Image: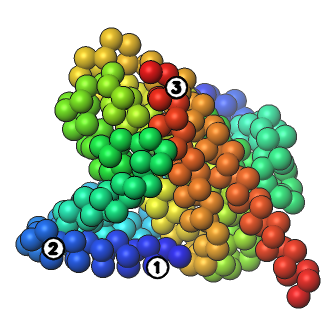
Amino acid sequence: MIFSFIISGLIKNVNVFDEFIKGAEDGLKTQLKIAPALIALVLAVEMFEASGALDVITWALRPLANVIHMPAEVVPMMVLRPISGGGAIALLNKTLEKYGPMSKIGLMSSVMCGSSETTFYTIAVYYGACGVNKTRHTVVAALAADAVAAVLSVVFVNLML
Amino acid sequence: MINYIWAALIVLSVISAIFTGRVSEITSAVYTGGDSAIQLCISMAAIMAVWGGLMRIAEKSGLTNIIGKILSPLIGLIFHKLDPKSEAAKAISMNVAANMLGLGNAATPLGIDAMKKLSELNHKSQRADNNMVTLVVLNTASVQLVPTTIAALRSKYGAENPMDIATTIIITSIISLIIGLVVNKIIIFITSRKREVS
């Protein structure tokens, strides 16, 4: 892909080096604009992970999880996935080690982890880059998608086994 | 909304820490959190610079025009009243292309680029317009065709066929993406009607 970018630039007589530098400068400026939002979010996420709040939420959501036949061991993944990408991967690692990749819990966690994104990170970064603070219904629509992904992971794996 | 979620994360963490006796852990998390945020910013800065540069070459050489044209029916379907020839539409199509190819590293800088161009069309307002919300929803529920990280972890713990979950992941993420976009459209429809009435 990168190769084709450069070649098409050369064919069209673009000053590839000059243009790259201008673009890279813009990219760095944007990064500087995003940085405060990232710092705020990462800080909150690390506090969340260190505090054991995940266990508290998992405990609170257990009755709801029962309704859709979601094992209690999978609930932390559902909670952590939209908040922390690295945290979700670490959790998947632990889950697969403990229950095995072919277990119901292992399969559900894998599908859930792979089928959604780190929602809050995306929202913070995208809006941070263009100075938007009124995000309107973004969180509602994005979390609706995450919830559907979580429920479907459970339903599909239950159907498969 | 983000204000409340951010505050809720911290308040909930502090309360849980008091009850689970992990006050010293979250105190140190305040400092390690800052550290890992700066590390994340530095590695992200590299990606932003590289893809910012490559995108500029692609724009000048007309490559973004071609990809924009190929994906314009799809973009027109998802986004509302967006000129397919606008810079924003081309940037969105580059972001969508990167997402479809599973280039996670490239998708973020390309998406942010598209976001800034949409923001210009929105007169750089602090209030997101419908298309900006749609682009963010699209990226929070993006479809990954080859789940490499997950498969690597699965094979590490002895899965014979670590890619066995790929189809399920693709179907799940496509359906959840569609639901996210539909919820988005419904809310836009309701709010625009309310405004017409009042």
Q: Quadrant location of the N terminus of chain A?
A: top right
Residues at marks 2 and 3 on the same chain? no
Which residue lies under the disc numbered 2? B19
Residue at disc 2, secondary structure: helix
Q: Residue at x 33, y 31 (%)?
A: A106
**Viewer-side residue, A11 vs B72:** B72
Q: Is residue B103 above or below residue B55?
A: above
**Mark pair 2, 3: CA separation:** 39 Å
Residue at disc 1, secondary structure: helix
Which residue lies under the disc numbered 1? B3
The picture quadrant where one finds residue B74 is: top right
Q: Residue at x 84, y 48 (%)?
A: B76
Upstream in sequence: badge 2 or badge 1 = 1
What subunit carries mark 2?
Answer: B
Q: Quadrant location of the C terminus of chain A?
A: top left
Which mark, by number, is residue A159? 3
Residue at disc 3, secondary structure: helix
Q: Is residue B125 above or below residue A139?
A: below
What subunit carries mark 1?
Answer: B
Q: Residue at x 81, y 70 (%)?
A: B190
Task: Indicate the position of residue A145 as horizontal and vertical percent values.
Answer: 59, 51
**Mark pair 2, 1: CA separation:** 24 Å
